[in-house]
Image: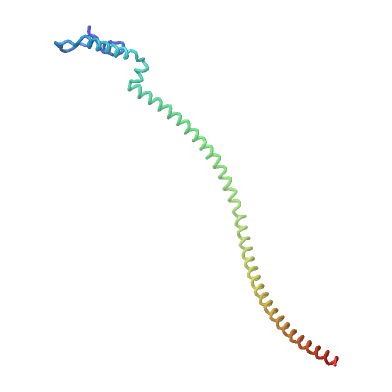
Amino acid sequence: KIKRWSDSPCGVPAASARTPTHRSTTRPAPAMARSATILALVAVGLGCALGAEEQTALNPIRKVVTLLQAMQKKVEKEGEVEKELYEKFMCHCKSGSGDLSASIAAAEAKVPDVGSNIEASEGKLSQTKEDLKAAQEDRSSANAAMKEAVALREKEAAAFAAEKAESDTNIAAMEKAIAA
């Protein structure tokens, strides 16, 4: 009976299962033959020593399946996170629309009040501008009156100084006349 690859317990053919297709007339040295036999037995032993888990880990199909399972877990986790974010967003939209509607209604109620406040402020502004213009006119007239009064006082002061000088000379002349 010929042993095949599948007949071996680990899927590795035994050294005796190999049958050469042609025979060589020269024989290898006995030391080399023993080394080759030992090497073959070590290879078979290593092949059998690998556990089922290591063999399945080396299997490319198992690797792909493992990657797909890991990817599935990752996608499911991301889906849960996205679902939570979506629920938060929807909660915000539902409550936010009510708040927004309330603030819009309040703003629309304030529109007439704000309009009347603006009109009152514009009226007050025009009144203040008129008052400012009147105050500026009063100031310029007051400045002109002050300049006029200063000029009149300077004229009166000059007249007083001239009259006093004349009076002082008259008094001095009388004192000399009385003393003589």
Identify which residue is drawn at 32% across, 14% down.
46
Q: Is residue 50 above or below residue 106?
A: above
The one nearer the camera, 18 or 70, is 18
Identify which residue is drawn at 61% across, 52% down.
110
The one nearer the camera, 117 or 80, is 80
Q: What is the residue that sits farthest to the front in this orientation?
A: 180
Quadrant containing the C terminus in the rendered view: bottom right
The answer to which image quadrant residue 75 occupies is: top left
Identify which residue is drawn at 35% across, 15% down.
50
User: Would residue 87 appear left or right of 147 to someone viewing this image?
Assistant: left
The answer to which image quadrant residue 145 occupies is: bottom right
The image's colour scheme reads rainbow
User: Would residue 140 appear left or right of 64 to someone viewing this image?
Assistant: right
User: Would residue 113 appear left or right of 24 to someone viewing this image?
Assistant: right
Q: Position of residue 23 (x, y in %)?
A: 15, 11
Q: Is residue 154 above or below residue 10?
A: below
Q: Is residue 11 visible?
A: no
The answer to which image quadrant residue 19 occupies is: top left
Q: Is residue 157 visible?
A: yes
The one nearer the camera, 83 or 172, is 172
Q: Position of residue 121 (x, y in %)?
A: 62, 60
Q: Position of residue 13 (x, y in %)?
A: 26, 12
